[in-house]
Amino acid sequence: MIDGEDLVVRRAAVQALGPFNGTVVVADPQTGRLLTIVNQKLAYKSGFQPCSTIKVVAALAGLNEGVITDNTLLRVGRRRGMDLTQALAHSNNLFFANVGVKLGFEKVTHYAKLFGLGEKASLIPEEQPGTLPDAPPADGMGMMTSFGEGIYLTPLQLASLMVGVADGGTLYYLQHPRSQEEVAQFVPRVKRQLEIERWIPEIKPGMMGAVEYGTARRANFSADDPILGKTGTCTDLRSPTHLGWFGSFNDIGQNKLVVVVLLTGGKPVNGPVAAGVAGAVYKNLAEVNYFANARPVSPLALISTQSCCR
């Protein structure tokens, strides 16, 4: 059912996905409303390995636990150190493997649960919850925090995480209105408030750097429309299927969006290709001036957001 979707957003997402096997999820980070889900069956599926998108969780966990700061240099080669901004922008595996080893399994799992992994992100009955491992990967914690090994999440869960980062720590239940009547009666529902607001400015430069000069350069369509995001590329060992992920949000204008892309096999796919699809969504919407005006919000939603979490 798409009767309750934002049809302008849906048109932009369908056009951007084109011939690729995959799904595009677009959400309003200020309310948790799902504006469109292209290929709903895939978006609701039991879960996929998050690949390098897990590095956002590892970064926030490392910052909150004092394992790293924004200027901590961790060794990523014999004579080379790297800070958090560069590690996020270039998706450096050794940096986040070190973070995982320092944190340990219990803390990584704690933060993954806190950020909504392993549980349903939405109020959609068909969505599956994904899974978190009961023990560290056989290859060590480094594989868990650099490739997401042992973790399985839905595109909706990654969208929920991006909503939390984009909105300063408010983790909403994602809701997908099925009719215009449901849109008119839409009320945001907060799942929990994440205590990450102080750390978001520490990860934003790396997520913006990914788009400006790092692994997500294909998403960069305009210097005036900054996009922040994290790519992911790996082979899902359960399938096995080659995956390309990109979780993102824009940081300008009134109609801010979260855009998540998951590509599954078919044509050669990876995180940079997924970033290109997301970039096309933003570009398509910019071309019709979608970000220029505030998105219509129901009175019930406006009252709810003002009273619950602003």
Image (spheres, rainbow, N blue to C red):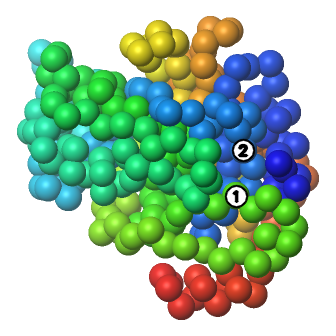
Q: Position of residue 220 (x, y in %)?
A: 65, 37
Q: Tell me the amino acid under the disc marked 1.
A: His
**Mark 2 touching mark 1, by CB under 8 A?**
yes
Corner quadrant of residue 148: top left
Vertical placement of 208 versus 4: above or below?
A: above
Q: How many marks?
A: 2
Residue 304 placement, left or right of 186: left
Q: Residue at x 60, y 51 (%)?
A: 125
Q: Position of residue 11 (x, y in %)?
A: 88, 43
Could you tell me if residue 261 is visible in this image?
A: no
Q: Tell me the amino acid under the disc marked 2.
A: Ile
Q: Residue at x 64, y 90 (%)?
A: 303
Q: Secondary structure at mark 1?
A: loop
Q: Position of residue 240 (x, y in %)?
A: 47, 10
Q: Residue at x 59, y 30 (%)?
A: 262
Q: Nearer the viewer, residue 121 or 168?
A: 121
Residue 42 placement, left or right of 121: right
Q: Residue furthest front?
A: 125
Could you tell me if residue 165 is visible in this image?
A: yes
Q: Nearer the viewer, residue 272 or 179?
A: 179
The CA span between labels 2 and 1 is: 9 Å
Q: Secondary structure at mark 2?
A: strand
Q: Residue at x 22, y 44 (%)?
A: 109
Residue 223 placement, left or right of 158: right
Q: Nearer the viewer, residue 69 or 177?
A: 177
Q: Earlier in the sequence, mark 2 or mark 1?
A: 2
Residue at mark 2 = 37
Vertical placement of 264 versus 133: above or below?
A: above
The disc label shown at residue 176, or none: 1
